[in-house]
Amino acid sequence: MVSNMRFPLRNLILSYLITIIIISAFSGIISSAYVEKLPTPRESDLLGLKVIELTNPIQNEVIKWFGVINEVSVLATVPKDGYYVLFLNNSGEHVGTHVDAPVHFYYDGLFINELPLDVLYGVAVVIDARKYVSHPNDTITMNELMDWERSVGVSIPKGSIVLLYTGWASYWGLYTSWDQYWSIARGWPGLSPDAARYLVSKGIVGVGIDTLSIDPAPAMNFPAHYILTEANIYIIENINTNLEKLADNAVFLLLAPMKTKYGSAGPGLELLAIYDPNADIHLNLLLASMIKASLDQVEKFDLAFTVENGIPAWFTIWRGFKTLGTPKEMISTYGAYYGFLTMNEHTGTHMDAPAHFAVGVWRIDEVPLDRFWGRAVIMDMRPYIRHPNYSITVEDIKSWEEKTGIRIGRNDIVLVYTGWARYWGTYRTWDEYWNTIGRGFPGLSPDAARYLVNKGIKGIALDTLSVDPPTQAVDFPAHKILVNANIWIGENYNLAILPKKDTTAFILSLPAMLVKEGSGAPARPILIYNFNLESIVNQYKALKNLLYSENNVKTLTTAATSGSLLSSHAVLALSLVLAFTSVLFITVYYRNKQYLN
């Protein structure tokens, strides 16, 4: 009897293996056919550091709750219409890489537009959780988080952001239906309730994961969501495969959610990580804490208007956000609060990608990351504006440069303040705007646009609806001159809130809702006064060298004190440098020691 069973059992095993091979091959076909449609995440060098993008943009034929995104359509093209625009039709907020606001599962929690600016950046630790995931729907437990802390010698810092790398990011885009998803990925891992409570006890401000949900697939009562959001902790989901490069390390994290009034999430979230690729978790914690400490101490201004029903758009009043009730009503009825967006990319404070008015130039997900930050030149052009539809000339700009002593330079981002930001949200119809309130808006003349192109700027933003005033709104010459030089254009920037104009500052202007091959995006520009990133990075490098070159430091100190190699002036100079570096290290260490446990 046993002998008779051997052959069928062997056949059964062989059949099983053949089936697995066929399924794997079929999965590979799906992968090779569809992965090509996924945009490549961007990377950039920054003063010897690395900046990488952790975003999966919004696009058709990828998974969402509980369906497949097929809501992005082309509204206009440059060859046919003279401009290029994409349109989102009744899209959910929880699509692509996105951040859940606390109100998503906690009716007294913060809406997405209420998240404080100082939690949208910070120190992040990246936990390689693959070793804790034994099956597709496994949970990462409190004990496993504590085991990770012991293994890397780091305690999860208070006020930090925790990112979990499970490996499930590699399944993104390999399926175009839920049936395909379950046959390939077979679910996803997430946090156990005790792990969520542990993170709350650590005082974190946010948590992220490379899966569809922070709760594992079987946990349809979403316990981790409830535990985290009730502590006003935001949750980032669908982080891309770049997270693997950061496993068991630390980064300085930036997130730029769209500021939707009453929003439950930031869809298509632009998520960037800054780190030293040649350093371990301890040094990267030091770097991230130094950047955060510096940002915490300086003046910062969010230049994005809130995206809400009733704001102006070309040429209508936008009413494209809807929910099925209040947070309390929806959480009581459906278990969660969420909304839907019907909009194009040029809504509210937004950025025009060069592709908006040209072909063969960058779309929004192709703009190099380092084009989104740099020196901001803040120009108060109100004294030059003679009437509501005035075109600022090259003579006006040159006059401003002479008057202020500020010269627009290569790679600057120019901010043009006209005063028209004061009209934002003060009218309910376009007739009201044109007849009694704004009566138009100023912009740039073609010669002014050419002058800025020749200066080598990488971006320009105004507090008006368009860089072209209404008198130029047929051919849009300023737009075309700028975008053909691959210069992005910001519109509806809230420059009125800036206390100091006719000066320079640092600006970080990120897309706030990234759509694949987009013509632009809602933006989340942050302007920072008295912030010198290069100085911070240089201080970090000095500390890194001090820590890694202890023997060299001792040798130099001995040589200097003996006078055998250096003059007395050099001895004094070196002593001062070493003393300053030591004091700096001690100051930074103790100021940020919670990150270095």
Image: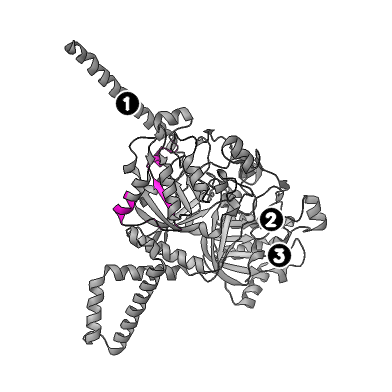
Q: Position of residue 406 (x, y in %)?
A: 58, 74
Examine the image and state in which quarter residue 34 appears: top left
**CA neighbours of label 2 inside 10 A, class few (<14), some (14 to 19), many (20+):** many
- Residue 493 relative to residue 42: left or right: right
Residue lying at 70% horizontally and 49% vertically, measured from the top left: 314
Inspect the magenta stretch and tell me whether residue 542 lies in it: no
Marks 2/1: CA–CA distance: 57 Å
Residue 155 forms part of the magenta stretch: yes
| Disc marking residue 20 | 1
Q: CA distance from mark 1 to mark 3?
A: 65 Å
Q: Amino acid at mark 2?
A: Leu
Query: In the rendering, which numbered label is found on residue 465?
Result: 2
Mark before the other along the chain sequence, 2 or 3: 3
Earlier residue among tags 2 and 1: 1
The mark nearer the N terminus, 1 or 3, is: 1
Residue at numbered disc 3: 419
Which span of residues is magenta-colored? 147-173
